[in-house]
Image (cartoon, rainbow, N blue to C red):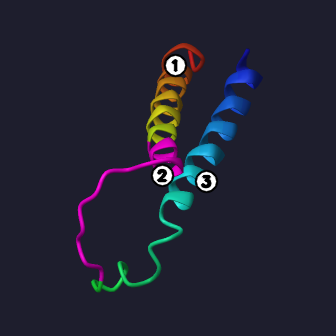
Amino acid sequence: MIKFIQISQIVLSVLLILSIILQNRGTGLGGAFGGEANVFRSKRGIEKFLFWTSIVVGILFVGISIFNLIYLTR
């Protein structure tokens, strides 16, 4: 059980990192130096999927981390 939790934490952390990096891929370096124009638009397609995937994976990662902290470190 402990190995499963640890492996799932590693997998979820890699998925979370990838989903966040893929969201920022099309922005370029302009946003890093303050040259980005703020245009508000709705998310569509793969952008919306990555957005919701990162939220779900983040919640799962935090939940498993809390479970590991409370129940498996006794």
Q: Quadrant of the C terminus?
A: top right
Which residue type does callout 3 highlight? Leu
Q: Residue 27: x percent and y percent?
A: 44, 73
- Where residue 47 is drawn, which disc sits there? 2
Alpha carbon of mark 2 to alpha carbon of mark 1: how far? Answer: 30 Å
Q: Residue 52: x percent and y percent?
A: 45, 38
Specify which label sits upstream in the sequence, 3 or 2. 3
Mark 1 element type: helix
Which residue type does callout 1 highlight? Phe
Residue at figure coordinates x 65%, y 47% from the top left = 14
Q: Residue 19: x percent and y percent?
A: 56, 50
- Bin the neighbour count of mark 2 within 10 Å (Cα to Cα): few under 14, some 14-19, many 20 and up: some
Specify which label sits upstream in the sequence, 3 or 1. 3
What residue range appears in magenta?
Answer: 36-51
For residue 73, above or below residue 52: above
Determine which residue is flagged by label 3.
Answer: 18
Main SS category, magenta section: loop
